Image (cartoon, helix red, strand yellow):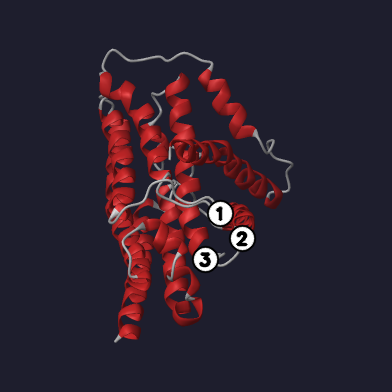
């Protein structure tokens, strides 16, 4: 068990920043530019780890602990999810609830760390993050309810790699509705366009970036690394569902999974290249639309089972 957890977490830590590089390269291609190196995220994280931290006298231990604990939280959540042929090192009945709670905890730590600075500017970003997360988490739960109903399980690894992933011919519409709504939540949870722009520094539109403005050094590295891991894990759930590899050999399953992750990163890059960022008052409408899609998916599953 110990070796499996180390291998699992190590694989995710090595591959996670690569998704950011693929997204950046895709956006650069659509803009007609060469763009940053594919491994730029690795360089940035390593550079930040070699720098020291600067703390305001206003902040407390909460501000200092939140980045490291947030990264640890998303890494622990990753052991509940299979990586293609690599089975989840940890699984138990109801672990899906713990999986979602881990991300709620990571968000809570980011919010209270931003409030700990005493800055009204960061408080504004924290309030926006809290409002959007209230809508996004409801949709996430509905999407997972669809998987639970189709698989008849409340174990994440079984929901992703069991009966649900092999029943596309029976519940294709429900899967498509779930996939579309989940993708919209994925963009919101990871502060991507059209919900947020991780590269912007425009005061009136910043959400996630404004909450981490006062972080520096290895604290900021923890945050960037945690964001990459969060994108990889939440994206991995979608790939496991939409790109089923049930019945293949473990090596083939791993290859299919990694190929799906590359396609997911390319898809995010295409969306960010073809869409403008929504105004803040339109973001709730987007998440409400995702809620409607997920709710219809739940109804489709329930009616089909009647």
Q: Are marks 2 and 1 in contact (CB under 8 Å)?
A: yes
**Residue 119 vs residue 29, the one in the foreground:** 29
Q: Which residue is mark 3?
A: 242
> Where residue 84 sits: x, y (%)?
55, 55
Asked if residue 139 lies left or right of residue 191, the reply is: left
Q: Is residue 57 left or right of residue 33?
A: left
**Residue 286 placement: quadrant:** bottom left
Left or right side of 123 for 35: right
Q: Nearer the viewer, residue 184 or 128?
A: 184
Q: From the top left corner, tell me how far across and down residue 134 is, in percent.
A: 27, 53
Q: Which residue is mark 2?
A: 249
- Rounded to the nearest angstrom, the CA distance separating label 3 from label 2 is 18 Å
Q: Percent from the top left, x then y, of residue 302? A: 30, 80
Name the residue nearer the viewer: 268 or 144.
144
Q: Look at 57% across and 36% down and name the residue there.
A: 14
Q: Are marks 3 and 2 in contact (CB under 8 Å)?
A: no
Q: Which mark is residue 113?
A: none
Image location (x, y in percent) of residue 41: 59, 34
User: Pointer 1: residues within 10 angstroms few (<14), some, or many (20+)?
Assistant: some
What is the distance, in whole Å, between disc 3 and disc 1 at their CAs? 16 Å
Sort mark 3 into few (<14), some (14-19) or many (20+) by Cα contacts within 10 Å.
some
Tag 2 or tag 3, which sits nearer the N-term? 3
Q: Which residue is mark 1?
A: 85
């Amino acid at each position: 068990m110990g070796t499996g957890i180390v291998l699992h977490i190590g694989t995710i830590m090595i591959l996670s920043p690569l998704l950011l590089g693929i997204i950046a390269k895709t956006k650069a291609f659509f803009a007609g530019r060469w763009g940053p190196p594919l491994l730029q995220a690795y360089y940035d994280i390593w550079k930040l780890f070699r720098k020291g931290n600067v703390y305001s006298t206003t902040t407390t231990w909460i501000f200092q602990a939140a980045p490291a604990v947030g990264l640890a939280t998303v890494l622990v959540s990753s052991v509940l999810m299979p990586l293609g042929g690599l089975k989840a090192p940890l699984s138990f009945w109801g672990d899906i609830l713990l999986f979602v709670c881990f991300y709620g905890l990571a968000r809570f730590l980011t919010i209270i760390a931003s409030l700990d600075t005493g800055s009204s500017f960061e408080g504004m970003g924290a309030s926006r993050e809290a409002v959007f997360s209230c809508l996004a988490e409801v949709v996430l739960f509905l999407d997972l309810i669809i998987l639970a109903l189709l698989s008849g399980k409340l174990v994440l690894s079984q929901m992703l790699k069991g009966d649900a992933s092999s029943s596309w011919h029976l519940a294709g519409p429900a899967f498509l509705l779930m996939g579309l709504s989940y993708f919209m939540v994925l963009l919101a949870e990871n502060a991507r366009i059209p919900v947020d722009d991780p590269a912007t520094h425009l005061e009136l539109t910043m959400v996630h970036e404004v909450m981490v403005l006062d972080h520096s050094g290895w604290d900021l590295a923890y945050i960037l690394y945690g964001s990459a891991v969060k994108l990889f894990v939440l994206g991995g759930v979608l790939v496991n569902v939409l790109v089923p590899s049930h019945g293949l050999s473990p090596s083939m399953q791993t290859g299919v999974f990694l190929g799906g992750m590359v396609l997911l990163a390319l898809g995010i890059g295409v969306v960010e290249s073809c869409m403008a960022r929504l105004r803040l008052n339109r973001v709730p409408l987007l998440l409400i639309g995702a809620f409607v899609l997920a709710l219809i998916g739940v109804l489709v599953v329930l009616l089909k089972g009647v």
